Image (tube, rainbow, N blue to C red):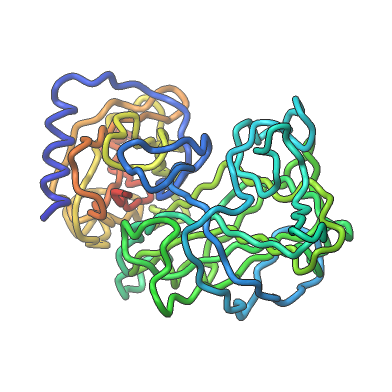
């Protein structure tokens, strides 16, 4: 019952008078966010936020054609690794000392090159004792993340939407075609809170996205994977998992390029979208801001967008997903669905003129990670002289380690 105790603690904190207000909403509920890549003092095992560098064996993957972030089906098997130093590090400059990244990337970022040397060297040209340039590889692995509960089997349950996004700068040989200097995004099932660089015996990573092409510092690529990506869904729906970014130079030749930089990594979830019948004039959306929902994050907040303006709102929190049309509960509604079993219902701030609102959900430092709670907004409208209730899409708040 850790979820229940967390919920009560959070509600008690809210009752103390946390400031409430309307703000711009970010669609989807955050499961993972890495933007600053700063150490987490309380964690001690992840010097780059929720990530840590990981040594990996050399491995040659498939070479899909095209440019961008390309899903690979079936995914390629990828090797397990071990904790240890690699060329991954936190980087401020971009390819040259004092260089700036183009938006949306901002320093610091996670980078695979030798830019952390003094003076910095913006390449991945590793030289051995004999003076020869040698093949090198390394991964950046996340902590074990809390996934979302399995979807109920019901015809009124739209699919869970798991989405991974990140921004990337990449400069490698051969115009980055991926034949050499391979850049992979990989996932695997993992117990929630498993340390970020630890792979137990027999761990099986799936290399399911390959980043190919070169994207310079002034023009980063934004890569979006999902919704309905079968590999992401298999990993994070009904189970917990990890994400990692793996670089492999494949050989020792032509390694004098800037390498691979990654920033603004976000994994999000959403369900019951659209939340109301297609004919409804409003389709409210739930979202979150303030980073990962992890212990000690008092800046985490839930947002509501695309709702009727100047309308009263409620926040429904629960542990199960009922998936009941609101008319079944005796509430007039334009075909909307209650996706959370309502254990707690909070009176929340009304929407502003743009149809947005938000509420802080401070997460106490002492709360145990890996609990999950379902969240969904209800919006009360007075259209046509009567009362009607709209619901938003729902999200699962997983307390991440």
Front one among 190 and 132: 132
Quadrant housing residue 144: bottom left
57 vs 162, left or right, is: right
Is residue 152 depicted above or below 342 in this figure? below
Q: Say which residue appears at 70% left-offset and 76% top-offset.
A: 60
Front one among 304 and 256: 256
Image quarter of the N terminus? bottom left
Quadrant housing residue 316: top left
49 vs 176, left or right, is: left
Q: Say which residue appears at 65% left-offset and 72% top-offset.
A: 58
x%, y% of residue 237?
38, 67
333 vs 283, left or right, is: left
Is residue 386 something that shows in the picture?
no
Q: Say which residue appears at 27% left-offset and 30% top-offset.
A: 312
Is residue 325 something that shows in the picture?
yes
x%, y% of residue 278?
47, 55
């Amino acid at each position: 019952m850790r979820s229940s105790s967390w919920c009560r603690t959070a509600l008690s904190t809210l009752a103390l008078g946390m400031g409430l207000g309307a703000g711009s909403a970010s669609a989807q509920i955050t499961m993972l966010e890495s933007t600053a890549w700063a150490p987490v003092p309380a964690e001690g095992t992840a010097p780059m936020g929720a990530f840590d560098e990981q040594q990996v064996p050399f491995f040659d993957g498939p070479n899909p054609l095209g440019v961008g972030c390309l899903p690979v089906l079936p995914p390629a098997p990828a090797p397990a690794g071990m904790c240890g130093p690699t060329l991954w590090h936190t980087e401020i400059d971009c390819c040259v000392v004092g260089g700036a990244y183009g938006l949306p990337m901002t320093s610091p970022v996670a980078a695979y090159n030798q830019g952390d040397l003094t003076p910095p060297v913006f390449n991945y040209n590793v030289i051995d004792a004999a003076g020869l340039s040698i093949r090198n590889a390394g991964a950046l692995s996340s902590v074990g993340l809390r996934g979302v509960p399995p979807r109920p089997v019901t015809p009124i349950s739209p699919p869970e939407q798991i989405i991974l996004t990140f921004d990337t700068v990449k400069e490698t040989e051969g115009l980055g075609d991926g034949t050499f200097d391979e850049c992979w995004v990989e996932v695997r099932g993992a117990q929630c809170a498993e340390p970020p660089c630890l792979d137990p015996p027999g761990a099986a990573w799936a290399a399911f996205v390959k980043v190919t092409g070169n994207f310079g510092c002034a023009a980063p690529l934004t890569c979006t994977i999902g919704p309905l990506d079968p590999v992401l869904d298999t990993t994070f729906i009904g189970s917990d998992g990890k994400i990692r970014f793996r670089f492999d130079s494949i050989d020792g030749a032509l390694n004098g390029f800037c390498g691979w930089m990654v920033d603004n990594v976000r994994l999000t979830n959403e369900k019951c979208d659209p939340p109301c019948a297609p004919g409804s004039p409003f389709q409210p959306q739930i979202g979150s801001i303030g980073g990962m929902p992890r212990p000690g994050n008092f800046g985490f907040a839930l947002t509501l967008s695309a709702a009727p303006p100047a309308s009263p709102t409620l926040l429904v929190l629960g542990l199960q997903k009922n998936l009941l049309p609101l008319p079944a509960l005796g509430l007039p509604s334009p075909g909307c669905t209650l996706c959370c079993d309502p254990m707690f219902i909070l009176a929340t701030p009304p929407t502003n003129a743009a149809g947005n609102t938000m509420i802080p959900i401070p997460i106490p430092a002492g709360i145990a990670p890996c609990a999950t709670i379902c969240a969904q907004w209800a919006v009360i409208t007075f259209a046509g002289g009567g009362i009607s209730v709209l619901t938003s899409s729902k999200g699962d708040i997983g307390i991440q380690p």
